[in-house]
């Protein structure tokens, strides 16, 4: 296999390409089961926290963000940031979530919904979010994981190699959950948790999948020049996708959602148990169950 990649010190993602993708996404409005699943998951997580939040920042492209069901004291209070849609709330239209117009220690809850996977430096992005939180403030962040669009990715690679002899990165690379969790911990958050789940969809036509990707502003924004995909490549990739499907008339797609949660340090915060402080030992549990 001959892979066209350049060894240089450029950033992985071209932020200008990304911002143009988000601008185009404003004109695409369709039902998004990924957003629905994420909304339900965030709502469930917040329902388990016995706390009302005073100041909330939501960075999202999800037009149904109200279904997050945030336990907030003043329902008109949340500050909503979106690059793709003007919400009828305390809404700021911004160009780049890496340049947020806020001072430190401002919010006690920040929800970053499907943005961190576009960062060229995930650790720095997480540190910026941590700085915006008040002590004992909570961050919930969702991002696409490494299994996202793997069917499309490998079908395009295989088809392009067979037809042209060259392959290009046509699907954005995404981080795996282990590395995401390690970076979350190293960015200074406390009580860190990283988990994941998958949303699996079926499409009648490849254009249906492409439209979904475009509606989220997730077109390919890798910082690399590459030629357009040839029609023959698309046709073969479509055939390969259908071969992978449980239904030969439908095209499968997988979206892995990684969720990172972490708290900003506070002296009264719950602390993990010290090593050796356990009162019940595994050997005793095993002995009693035998």
Image (cartoon, grey):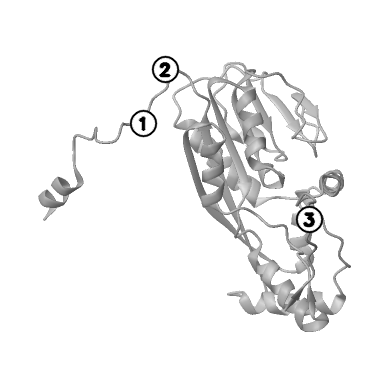
- Picture residue at 67% right of the left edge, 36% below the top: 125
Residue 178 position in % (x across, y down): 51, 51
Badge 3 element:
loop
Q: Is residue 222 left or right of residue 58?
A: right
Q: Is residue 289 above or below residue 88?
A: below
The residue tagged 3 is 222
Q: Residues within 10 Å of mark 1 (few under 14, many from 20)?
A: few
Which residue ends up furthest to the bottom in the rendered image? 162
Residue 289 position in % (x across, y down): 13, 52
- Picture residue at 81% right of the left edge, 54% below the top: 223
Badge 2 element:
loop
* Pointer 3 or 2: first along the chain: 3
Residue 55 position in % (x across, y down): 62, 19
Give the Cα separation between the discs numbered 3 and 2. Answer: 43 Å
The residue tagged 1 is 272
Q: Is residue 191 above or below residue 79?
A: below
Residue 253 position in % (x across, y down): 65, 64
- Picture residue at 59% right of the left edge, 34% below the top: 68
| Image quadrant occupied by the C terminus | bottom left
Q: Indicate which disc residue 268 carries.
A: 2
In the foreground, 122 or 35: 122
Q: Residues within 10 Å of mark 3 (few under 14, many from 20)?
A: many
| Image quadrant occupied by the N terminus | bottom right
Q: Is residue 270 above or below residue 7?
A: above
């Amino acid at each position: 296999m001959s892979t066209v990649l350049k060894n240089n010190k450029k950033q992985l993602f071209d932020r200008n390409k990304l911002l143009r993708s988000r601008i185009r996404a404003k004109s695409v409005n369709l039902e998004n089961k990924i957003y629905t699943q994420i909304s339900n998951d965030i709502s469930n997580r917040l329902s388990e926290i016995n706390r009302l939040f005073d100041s909330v920042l939501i960075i999202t492209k999800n037009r149904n963000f109200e279904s997050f069901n945030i336990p907030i004291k003043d329902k008109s209070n949340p500050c909503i940031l979106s690059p793709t849609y003007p919400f009828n709330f305390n809404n700021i239209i911004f160009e780049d979530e890496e340049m947020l117009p806020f001072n430190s220690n401002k919010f006690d809850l920040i929800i970053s919904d499907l943005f961190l996977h576009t960062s060229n430096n995930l650790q720095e992005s997480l540190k910026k979010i941590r700085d915006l939180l008040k002590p004992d403030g909570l961050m919930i962040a969702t991002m696409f994981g490494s299994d996202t669009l793997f069917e499309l990715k490998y079908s395009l690679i295989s088809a392009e190699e067979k037809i042209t002899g060259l392959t290009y990165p046509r699907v954005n690379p995404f981080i795996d959950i282990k590395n995401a969790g390690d970076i979350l911990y190293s960015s200074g958050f406390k009580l860190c948790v990283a988990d994941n789940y998958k949303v699996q969809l079926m499409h009648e036509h490849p254009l249906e999948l492409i439209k979904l990707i475009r509606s989220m502003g997730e077109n390919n924004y890798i910082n690399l020049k590459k030629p357009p995909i040839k029609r023959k490549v698309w046709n073969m990739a479509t055939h390969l996708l259908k071969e992978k499907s449980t239904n030969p008339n439908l095209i499968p797609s997988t979206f892995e959602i990684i969720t990172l949660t972490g708290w900003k340090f506070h002296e009264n915060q719950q602390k993990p148990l010290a090593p050796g402080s356990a009162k019940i030992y595994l050997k005793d549990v095993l002995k009693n169950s035998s």
